[in-house]
Amino acid sequence: MQPLDGLPQGIRSRIVAGVNGLAMHVLEAGEAGRPALLLLHGFPELAYSWRKVMPALAAAGFHVIAPDQRGYGRTTGWSADYDADTAPFRMPNLVRDQLALLHALGIARVQAVIGHDFGSPVAACCALIRPDIFARVAMMSSPFAGAPRWDAAPRDTVHEDLAALDPARKHYQWYYATREANDDMLRAKQGLHDFLRAYYHHKSADWPENRPFELAGWTAAELAKLPTYYVMHAAETMAETVAPHMPHGACAWLTEAELDVYAAEYARTGFQGGLNWYRCQTGGGNAAELRLFSGLRISVPSLFVAGAADWGIHQFPGALRRMREEACKDMRGVHLVPGAGHWVQQERPEAVIRHLLDFLRATG
């Protein structure tokens, strides 16, 4: 396999073997032995998504570690077969992956675990379950509302109600759990490169319609107010959903060369590894296992950072409030970065670096 292209100076790449059954691809910056930071990406992203913040965090005195998580990039040892067991992609095992990585690197404790998008709940669960190892947590773009409760929730009819709307709608996470989703994106009519360009643009602050607000509740009428990349038209694939929003001209925060890295990696691996995370979420596998921690709160200092134009903070109504008031005992700040959408650490890396370093210094 060719070396990963486009890494900024000071970031190095290697494979770490023996990580909970994986050979894990890791990007690093800063000297080993310094206080460690663990950075966890989301979907459809890679360790590469942290390239703009890693050098500055290393320059501040940290050993910065960003893995390609299970199902992504150059990490191997996982199955892309839709019919294979999805249990390895459940949340407790994703936490186990990070513990195994730290063990393989000889790191007993990290100063902070920092997660973006689907990496945010992984980071939150790391801090929830093992506060002795993860001394702080910073969540980005996806609020963590806490472990599921033991009491049974009423039957959720929202998907039936979405399908009954005119026009009919569907939630993207449940679409991502379908057999067709991987091929829909990997073999998009517009090509993989253009699909990713439109997808990243549609969820960024560059798309002028991203003006999020809090929804009143988990109902079809309220969810239908979300952009179509979250609540899709029922007859469309994700590639068809984002195609009309293909931007024209250069993108300042994601150059063609940078986009080529994502396109090349996903052309090789497909999307199924990351989509399996959604299958565990929507199918109830995560909830069944995380109920073990019901009522437990994150005890370590916590931070939340997102783009001010990021609908992700409101896609699950009430999650932001529950994170601040219930899930975290020591929430130090919620920062919504102007001029950033969903890809906040790529769109506005300077602001993210500032908030992270301020948080780390303020908590000792």
Image (spheres, rainbow, N blue to C red):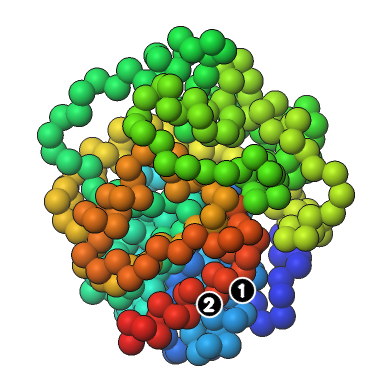
Label 2: few (<14), some (14–19) or many (≥20) C-alpha neighbours in 10 Å: some
Q: Position of residue 23 (x, y in %)?
A: 51, 61
The x and y percentages for residue 76 are 54, 54
Task: Note whether residue 360 is visible.
Answer: yes
Q: Residue placed at 29% from the left, 22% from the top?
A: 156
Which element is circle 1 on?
Answer: helix
Which label was assigned to residue 354? 2
Query: Do callouts 1 and 2 mark residues in contact (Cβ within 8 Å)?
Result: yes
Image quadrant of residue 131?
bottom left
- Residue type for callout 1: Glu
Horizontal placement of 56 versus 283: left or right? right
Left or right side of 242 for 180: left
Using the rendered view, name the quadrant where residue 247 is placed: top right
Tag on residue 296? Answer: none
Using the rendered image of the protein, determine whether residue 80 is visible from the camera's viewpoint: no
**Apparent side of residue 230 relative to residue 360 in the rendered image (left or right):** right
Number of numbered labels in the structure image: 2
Q: Could you tell me how far apart the alpha carbons at marks 1 and 2 are, in whole angstroms?
A: 6 Å
Q: Position of residue 238 (x, y in %)?
A: 63, 30
Q: Residue at x 20, y 23 (%)?
A: 154
221 to 18, vertically: above or below: above
Q: Is residue 197 above or below residue 350?
A: above
* Picture disc at residue 350: 1
Residue drawn at the location 61% of the way across and 57% of the way down: 340
* Quadrant occupied by the C terminus: bottom left
Name the kind of residue labelled 2 in the image. Arg
| Residue 349 x %, y % | 61, 69
